[in-house]
Amino acid sequence: MALPDKNMNARRVAAFAVHLFTASGVVVAMLALNAAIERDFPLCFAWLGAALFIDGIDGTLARAAGVREIASAIDGVVLDLVVDFLTYVVTPVVAIWRSDLMPAPLAFWLGVFVTFASALYFADTRMKTGDYWFRGFPAIWNVVAMYFFVLRPPALVMAALMVLGSAAMFAPIVFVHPLRVKKLRAFTIAVCVAFFVLSAAAIWQEFSATILVKSGFIVIALYFLSLPFLRHSPWAEA
């Protein structure tokens, strides 16, 4: 009788552990959602930050562990989308609704519209290009909500941005995947780290953000919005 391959068993354990790690994002999402419902917005966004960290590294761990080959009984892509829909769409939409950033009825119905459009976007098989850019705005409503809480633009501006963002998910534009797009990847990751640091500062300040934090948010937004124009740039290749 053949002896079990201990190395293969260890690889299976590692692969399924990655699935568990990805699924832990649902627990974090529920904690963030509860905080949003209770109007504890600093705690809500702290949990959303933890969820974003999990989502940022679980794909790399999955590829390193060979999850698709070794633990294919669970579809990691579907699992990731389930978690992302809760953390990127549902929870931040509820946070905007439960806040005083805009009239509650307006925030609720805009949230319904955003959730509806995002569900279609998440099911779109053309979500990514061959070089791993997102097609359209990638439904990162957690980031949009963070900007709303930090910058606090007028309610009508926020409403217009939510409608525009929903339409942009299906527009012929691209948006960078910070970890998978090779061009300027090291610098883009550094900018993401800066965003995490500034977000932590804003949360610590309970969204009474200093001008330095607000300015940093604006510069980071301009950087990410400019990246699609550099997609085919020789400078970006270098």
Image (cartoon, rainbow, N blue to C red):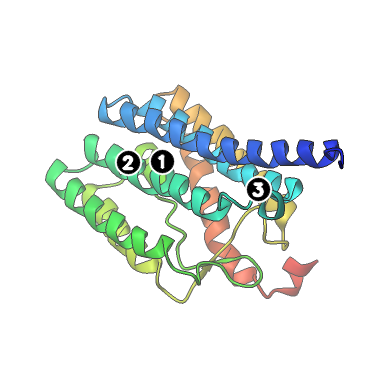
Dot 2 alpha-carbon crowd within 10 angstroms: few under 14, some 14 to 19, many 20 or more: some
Q: Position of residue 186 (x, y in %)?
A: 74, 51
Three-letter amino acid code at the position of disc 3: Ala
Per the image, the residue denoted by label 2 is 152
**Is 106 positioned to the left or the right of 129 in the image?**
left
The mark found on residue 146 in the picture is 1
Residue sitting at 45 percent across and 63 percent down?
137
Q: Position of residue 26 (x, y in %)?
A: 45, 37
Between the C-alphas of marks 2 and 1, the distance is: 10 Å
User: Disc 2 or 1, which lies upstream in sequence?
Assistant: 1
Q: Residue at x 23, y 35 (%)?
A: 98
Residue 131, image x and y in percent?
A: 66, 69
Mark found first going from the N terminus, 3 or 1:
3
Amino acid carrying mark 2 in the image: Arg
Does residue 128 appear left or right of residue 183 in this picture? left
Camera-side residue of 120 and 48: 120
Quick one: 121 or 77, which is closer to the camera? 77
Question: Mark 2–mark 3 contact, CB under 8 Å?
Answer: no
| Badge nearest the viewer, 2 or 1 | 1
Check disc 1 and give the amino acid type: Met
Q: Say which element carries label 3.
A: loop
